[in-house]
Image (cartoon, helix red, strand yellow):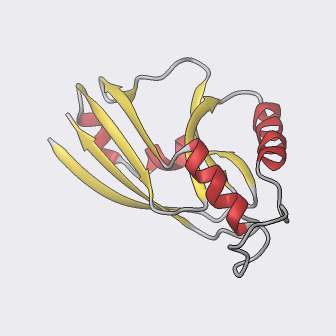
Amino acid sequence: MWQRHRLSLEPRPRGFHLVTDEILGALPDLGEIRTGLLHLQLMHTSASLTLNENADPDVRHDMALFASKLAPENLSGMRHTLEGADDMPAHVLASLFGTELTLAVERGRLLTGTWQGIWLGEHRERGGARKVTATLMG
């Protein structure tokens, strides 16, 4: 079975957001897969997808703090500034964190660790709704 879904994640402020339930809620066919894969591709260059801690929100806070130090706004010498001070740092973070995830599926569920969840890294102040292409194989 191959299925493709195009999802739209609700707009969020800058930071890291747990979006596992939002993504899984948009994939009714996941329950049909005994053994397979879910590939997620974020269709943007200023946000990211990653797999990380799903229980303690302090981890998302601390990751956002780290990201702001790693790719600060108004870094001297940046040329791509027409779309705002947060745009070029957002591109840097999207490349570093990545915009794709491939996750194992077993018996209709994601095969993730106990404390793992899917994060959206929103790297702009107002990135808007984010589009994700989800491909199920199994």
Q: In this view, does 7 lie above or below 58?
A: below
Image coordinates of residue 107 in percent, x first then y, are: 29, 23
Quadrant for the C terminus, please: top left
Image coordinates of residue 9 in percent, x first then y, are: 54, 60
Picture quadrant of residue 63 = top right
Image coordinates of residue 78 in percent, x first then y, are: 75, 67
Q: Is residue 92 above or below residue 108?
A: below
- Please say whether residue 19 is visible from this viewpoint: no
Depth check: give the residue in front, 17 or 47.
47
- Horizontal side of 125 relative to 1 (left or right) equals right
Image coordinates of residue 74 in percent, x first then y, are: 85, 65
Residue farthest to the left, as pictured: 1
- Residue at 78% x, 35% y is 57
- Horizontal side of 83 relative to 48 (left or right) equals right
- Residue at 75% x, 61% y is 13
- Please say whether residue 109 is visible from this viewpoint: yes
How many numbered marks are there? 0
Residue farthest to the top, as pictured: 114
